Amino acid sequence: MKKVIACVAGLLAAGSAFTRPVTAAPAAVFTHGPAQCHALAFTFDLCPVREGSGFDAPLVKFLVDHNVHATFFASGTWIAAHDAQLRELLSHPFFEIGTHGQAHAHMTTQDSTAQSAEIRGPVATLGKKYAEKASLFRPPYGEYNDETLRQAEAAGQTVVMWSIVSGDPDPKLAADRIVADVVSRARNGSVIIFHANGRGWHDDAIVPAVYRALVEAKHFATDTVSELRSCAGQAPPR
């Protein structure tokens, strides 16, 4: 039985990287950075889980040890259960925190009031409890409609998707296959989706391998989503 509370973050809605590409998003949705920017955004969803710690500590340690600029999208339910872990993420200036819905709900099945609450819930928690102003929203399952975009704009949020799906929630995908696929499709400005809630299978091996292949070997910089959005040219190596 799945231990994840339906945390596939768009693999079912947008299609696996190994089956078909993600459908083109409207201009109001950020999916990749400028083509002239030699940088990547490593992004990690923090979906709620029923069992386990819900936090991939070895993965986060790797990111910290290698000064990887990264963006984490945390659901309100995850935040409520992971105070210490969230504070750890917030303690690193090269990490950025976005949101991933209050209860990881299917946005397109919700009316405008429910969508607003789903978007605003974790934003309010981050502001009131952690003095953190969040401005990036990744829809659960990668599902959104015009009402989602309206409610996100009203809440001061930018909707963030991705340009490369790692496929890490699928335990049937071998780590080397994921690494090869991500590396082969990486381009200037790519936004890559992983998970850091303990339900990204093999991510302890996958993320370091992708880092070595793209950052160390090909000299991509790692940017947060906000850094990538404002990147005006080739990013210098860090």
Image: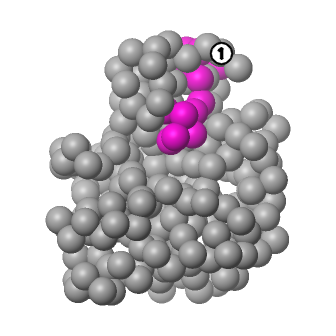
**Residue 22 in picture, x, y percent from top left:** 24, 48
Residue at 46% in and 14% down: 233
Camera-nearest residue between 234 and 18: 234
Residue at 41% in and 22% down: 188
Image vertical order of residue 107 relative to residue 234, above or below = below
**Residue 162 in picture, x, y percent from top left:** 37, 46
Does the magenta run of residues contain 224? yes
Q: Which residues are magenta?
A: 216-228
Residue at 23% in and 85% down: 111
Relative to 37, is 206 on the left or the right? right
Residue 116 visible in the shown view: yes
Residue 34 falls in image quadrant: top left
Image vertical order of residue 98 relative to residue 67, above or below = below
* Color style of the picture: one colour
Q: How many marks?
A: 1
Residue 113 falls in image quadrant: bottom left
Residue at 54% in and 70% down: 123
Q: Which residue, given by chain and number where applicable, does mark 1 sit on? A: 237
Image vertical order of residue 36 relative to residue 33, above or below = above
Camera-nearest residue between 110 and 215: 110
Residue 172 visible in the shown view: no
Relative to 39, is 188 on the left or the right? left
